[in-house]
Image (cartoon, rainbow, N blue to C red):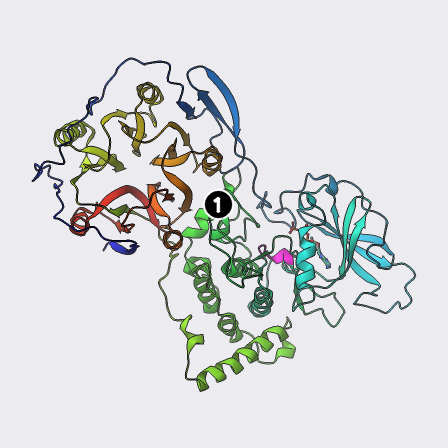
Amino acid sequence: MPQLRSGVRRGRRPTATAPLRDTDKGKAARKKATGRTAGKGTARKRNNNVVSGNKDIEVVVVEDGAERNDDAALTGVALVKVGNNNTRVEEVGEEVAEKMDECDSGGRGSDKGLGADDEGSTAPVPERVQVGGSPAYRVEKKLGKGGFGQVYVGRRINSPNPNERTGPGAVEVALKFEHRSSKGCNYGPPYEWQVYSALGGSHGIPRVHYKGRQNDYYIMVMDMLGPSLWDVWNNNSHTMSIEMVACIAIEAISILEKLHSRGYVHGDVKPENFLLGPPGTPDEKKLFLVDLGLAVRWRDNSTGLHVDYDQRPDVFRGTVRYASAHAHLGRTGSRRDDLESLAYTLIFLLRGRLPWQGYQGDNKGFLVCKKKMSTSPEALCCLCPAPFRQFVEYVVNLKFDEGPNYAKCISLFDGIVGPNPDLRPINTEGAQKLICQVGRKRARLMMDDDNEEEEDWQPKKKVRMGMPATQWISVYNARRPMKQRYHYNVADVRLDQHIVKGNADGLYISSVASCSNLWALIMDAGTGFSAQVYELSPNFLPKDWIMEQWEKSYYISAIAGANNGSSLVVMSKGTQYLQQSYKVSESFPFKWINKKWREGFYVTAMATAGTRWAIVMSRGTGFSDQVVELDFLYPSEGIHRRWEAGYRITSTAATSDQTALVLSIPRRRPSDETQETLRTSAFPSVHVKEKWAKNLYIASVCYGRTVS
Ligand SMILES: Nc1ncnc2c1ncn2[C@@H]1O[C@H](COP(=O)(O)OP(=O)(O)OP(=O)(O)O)[C@@H](O)[C@H]1O
């Protein structure tokens, strides 16, 4: 069954006259299109000589194998040819990730990445510390080291009360050192200080008593805590009882609820960042969450509104093993991400391993995210009690701005732990308070005859199922009635005859796609082109041919690639483009796109061949802004959010792993901005006709990954 996506409609509908259209059988048009004939450079494969001297053309060609081809990972090199002569080498892609898991083989501290090379991690820390009006401390044993700082025991020198255990006068404190040259201190004191000022001492967050700079180090004096959950798991032969993990779930959810209620998301939830209180003290069964260096606001402080949705596929924040799939994909962090990371933390503690451990190399983040998306909650939680699966299912299906039902999540695990809170291996006091609060609120709601609390726990459409599927994605725009024609399952040898016939009928190719090494071809009378050429090539893409056509002032208007590596490139005259570049890459080249955006280029065509991507970017497009939605499944939520913000899909492409949609804001808005999308297993031949009947015409089509 096709899955109909409701589209957006803005502005007036034009007064409809019956649209003119052909069928896939290549029938003659019922009426000749508006007097246009195939232009002077008639749409045929041609081999004219190169005309030199066109200074407006910039060519960016990254040939297969000419670079590391891994834009998503680190730096690559692109050959940039300006005009006909000057070739220079350009660095493309900069390191954007803030913290990454560099070695995922397990082991404490080994999965914390950036910052390890900072001067701060090698320069010796002072032997004596006194900052911000604090007492003087002697620096003792090292407690831990992360990507940003190092944490040591601080022992008060000349303590008036040697029994003072906590608070500003405590004999023993934790000292977190960050070198002034470390990545987190580029603009002064570590960002984490601000977050601790806002959150320190709130339920489950340790208190910071003093902070200040001493010589080269920024130093934070905080409550001394005990082992992390990773330490406990590691010291217990890599196991943890179900009851212990269920208690951790209960208390961790209540800590996150409190942190979220203050407008923040933590951004790096993992076993290493949950610490117990110091052993042998009344807090030894109490859970704390540390490391607020990646915390961000999900709620704007001044407006009180949820922050805006965005996706920057080159930005990764967090730890690879536990990061949410949305974090991998560079989506703005929100409450759902902390809960997804908590779910992975719990499963890790319970099962001792996550299915995406062990990947290495430059594209590790990609492989881990792909595995996360294709692992169903059932597979992830097999052998775990049902509440764990229910929790995973709930959190991976949360929407960007959805308020999680924390109390309901806690109640899932409540049945696993013993009834007497005093006998539980982890103190669940905070969660008890939350459940009581919610209970009181619910009682009030029930008196008001309002059952809102329960609504968000109703079964909803599951987004992540763990079952990969490939489909056709077709995009339809409202247009004045016009002639449009499609062909699909077209073998190489049949292409020419369809194109010649279309041209004779006044049609030009507007989109191309490929499925199973057969081509799909959309031709219509609404392109505005005056001439068109095309090339069917065994290469992805045919560089020499493209450069020849560029010299003759043709610009790439549509591209498609087949699994066998061949490509179909369509170049046209009459586009509004002024300059064009393209890049072929092994992974989606978001860094390159980002760089070209800054130079005034916009994506105007995309294609894939197997796992490779080709992106064409042009100047003079008439777009005022552009964004990318990239996902391991059809990014339905992202598209709806972009639609609401005024974007419309302008290019699509998909591999068998990922779908990419480029959405743009046109400088001149059409009177009817209706756009709809459709996902179908077979080419949507019947559906296209239904769309035509509503004056909706195919604007873009591709075949690839839609379901995970
Ligand atoms: N208050 C504390 N008491 C005891 N140990 C602590 C305390 N704070 C941190 N630690 C230890 O130091 C380690 C590193 O601390 P933290 O996570 O804050 O540093 P980081 O550099 O920000 O780490 P990351 O790379 O995870 O961001 C923790 O995993 C923990 O073992």
**Horizontal and vertical percent position of residue 436:** 56, 80
Q: Quadrant of ligand 1?
A: bottom right
Magenta stretch contains residue 270: yes
Which region shows up in magenta? 267-273
The vertical placement of 595 against 356, above or below, is above
Q: Is 40 on the left-hand or right-hand side of 581?
A: left
Tell me, yes or no, if residue 128 can be seen here: yes
**Which residue was labeled with disc 1?**
312
Q: What's the residue at 17%, 48% (across, down)?
A: 692
Crowding near the residue tagged with mark 1, few <14, some 14–19, many ≥20 C-alpha atoms within 10 Å: some
Residue at the image position 58 percent from the left and 69 percent from the top: 254
Q: In this view, does 221 lie to the left or right of 631?
A: right
- The percent position of residue 212, horizontal first and vertical second, equals 79, 53
Q: Where does the N terminus fall, quadrant-wise?
A: bottom left
Under circle 1, the secondary element is loop
- Whether residue 526 sits left or right of residue 233 in the image: it is left
- Give me the residue at 83% from left, 53% from top: 140
Residue 235 visible in the picture: no
Three-letter code, disc 1:
Arg
Of residue 444 and residue 665, the one placed in the foreground of this image is 665
The x and y percentages for residue 132 are 81, 56
Residue 2: percent from left, percent from top: 24, 54
